[in-house]
Every structure is written in structure tokens, then in C-alpha cells.
Amino acid sequence: MISVRRGLLGIGLAAAIVGGVAACGGTGEVPPEQALPVGHYTLDGQLQVWPARGGLSGDGAAHRAVADAVDAWRTPAGDRPRLETSGILWLGEIDGRTLAVVAADVPVYGASWLLQLDGTGDGLTVTNAAQYTDPGYLVYSDLLPVRLDDTTRYLTSARVEQVTGPNGRPLRVSDGLTDPVGVQRCTATPVAVRLRATESLPRGTANDELLDLGSAVEPPRYPVVPDRDGRGATALEDLDTCALAGEDIAFGSIDPNPADGRSYPRVPASWPIESIYQVNLGEVESGPLAGRFDRLTWRSQEGTTYAAVFRPENGTPAVSKADTVAAVQAYEIEIQGQTYVVLSWNDEDDDAVLQLPDGVRPVLEQRGLAVVPKADRRQTFRVSVDGRLETRTVEK
């Protein structure tokens, strides 16, 4: 997820696929009809970011098995990858099985998929397929997740000098693959990489932070996001990331609405790409709403995206669906069996005025925040903020 993109536009970094990259030293040549390259010819200056790695990267039979499996694979929408512009990033034996990691290019939507193939003997099948959230930039990442049963490893690019695990200690890396990392199923886990100096990063990087959203995050959601200032780890430390991925909460709640109208597993439009952080909205000292209201913010395909989080003094946090309206956010959140509407706006505007529907009294009203019980009828709220009258309507 740490990306060459920071230097890509400035130096015109070349990215092209060269068939048969680094397929040397193996037991046989790759047949010409198998166009899936070994390695990916993504350059940072003269450095190949994803060279061929793994003990079977030069094995023609293993390569052919991977190419056949990838050629047979389809996205949930039924689209097929283009082998010539894809690449086998790692191919070898690990934990008693054959493992292949492939960056698959699906040109119809400019999509990038991270495929993991497992098998024993001559058979390989795609066992995990995650769509990279930022289309087209998978091969400019430097740390890719690999799930094996109940363990997680990471595949590193050639630019990575060191990987630090969640315990703050460096991980051992062998042929680009880390030792197992203690990633929990539904908890955000921080990891960090140090990148060596390259043409796009003349000084390298000392400590680029990322968040793995959990080993149980279901494909096709891509589970690793940048967390360059560490604020994402703080925002998510007490939240269930599997719940956040659900269709009624935060990260999973905005449907991408595909143009073809078909129903199939796909990445929610609200799934995070980067920049996860939280802002405290207000606190209640006593009563049924005793606790803290926060606004969770992140970047998704929809742009800047928000959700409300209520953290009670005792108990499990409650999280709303996502909202993408910047001026005044309106969330519905259930607290102790009661649904509330949480309104949030710019708390730096001293002249902001909240207008509530007739007969509605807030249970909490503070600068930039109001919480009211949701009614069994349509409710319209107005806030004069930043010189404009903003209107939000909550349906029954």
C-alpha cells in the first residue's frame, strides 16, 4: 500500500509487462501460449519493484499451472483477467503447500486484483481474490497481504528494507515473504515498512504505517490501508472491523450500484482507501447517553466519507452507516434499543443555527452537534452554517 505513486508522475516511472521476466534457472521453459509473466516489470528508476521470487519462480510446470488457474478465474462480475499485463509476484513452497501470489489486471474496469493460489501436487486454485481499492495501482504497492489458514504473512516489494510487526519488532523476511504476523480476525492491526532510497524516493522512508483491517475481512474487499500518521489505528482500536464491513455500518454501507444492475459480491463504494481518523464531537457525562460521540472519517471511492461512533462509558461502541455530505452530516445510530439521529456540522462557525422540526427536542445539543430521537415520521433538519442554509431529511 505504500506507493510509488508519490514519485510516479514526477519522474515518469515506467510500468510495462515483459513476458517471461526472470523465468530462469527452472526446470523447463514456459510455453509461448502461456502469456502470464513471472514477476512484474514495474520500475523505480532501474529497480524492478516486483521481481520474480519464490523457489518455483523458474519452474515451467508450476508456472503453467498458475497461468491455467488464473486464465480460468473470473471476477464476481464474470470478467476475465488479461494475462499479458498481469504478473506472478511469488511462486514457491510454503507451509507444505504450493503458493502463488498474482497481480491480476482486469482491463474492463481498470481494476487490479490480488490473487492467491494454493494447492498440492500439480493442482492450483484461486483461494483468495481481493480487488485493490485504488484501481490500477496494486503493483505500485510495497506490502501485500497473504492469508494462509489462520496465519497472515506479507509479500514485500524490492523497495522494502524492513517490515515492523504490531509488536514493534522487525519481521524476518525470506525471499520477499515475511514470517507469520499476529493479525487478529476482526481487529485493525498496525504494521510498518521502511523503504530504501530509490529514484522516486531519494531519501527512502523511515516508517510508513499501514493498517491490516483483519484476517476475517471477506473478499473482494482489500484489507490493507495506509495509516501514515497512525491516526487510523487509534480510531479503530476498539471497533470490530468485521462489523464495520457489514452492509448496515460505516465501511460497507454504500452500495456501488453497478451499471449492469446485477447482484454479485463487490467492494462497497464506502470501503476505505486511506486517511482513516476520528474527531471528537461531544461527550455526555450521565444518563442513557453517557459516553462520547465521535466522527469517523476516511477516503473512499465516494471521496471523503463519514460515520458517527458512540462510545458508551461501559459497553460496545455503536456505529452508523456512512455519509458523504460535507456541510452537515446526518446519521442514524442505535443506542440501547433506541434509534437516534446524530447531526454534525462545522463547530468553528460561531453563527451556526440549528432548526429542528416542530415538537422535537434534542437530548444533546452542543457546538457542532445535536442528537435527537428518531421519530416514526419523516424529519427535516436545517442548519445555517458557513453562510448557507443546509437541509438534511431523515426518512421514517
Image (tube, rainbow, N blue to C red):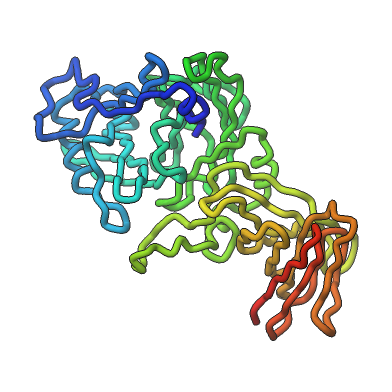
Total numbered badges shown on the rendered structure: 0
Rendered residue at 36%/68% (across/down): 261
Residue 166 horizontal side relative to residue 391, left or right: left
Q: Nearer the viewer, residue 57 or 396?
A: 396
Rendered residue at 24%/44% (across/down): 125
Rendered residue at 14%/34% (across/down): 34
Residue 310, placed above or below residue 94: below
Q: Position of residue 4 (x, y in %)?
A: 47, 27
Q: Position of residue 201 (x, y in %)?
A: 52, 19
Q: Position of residue 17 (x, y in %)?
A: 27, 29
Rendered residue at 40%/57% (across/down): 266
Is residue 93 visible in this depiction of the protein?
Answer: no
Residue 318 horizontal side relative to residue 249, left or right: right
Residue 307 horizontal side relative to residue 111, left or right: right
Where is residue 358, by image quadrant?
Answer: bottom right
Quadrant placement of the C terminus? bottom right
Q: Position of residue 370 (x, y in %)?
A: 81, 66
Is residue 270 visible in this depiction of the protein?
Answer: yes
Where is residue 290, by image quadrant?
Answer: bottom right
Outermost residue toward the front in this view:
387
Residue 301, placed above or below residue 249: above
Where is residue 123, by image quadrant?
Answer: top left
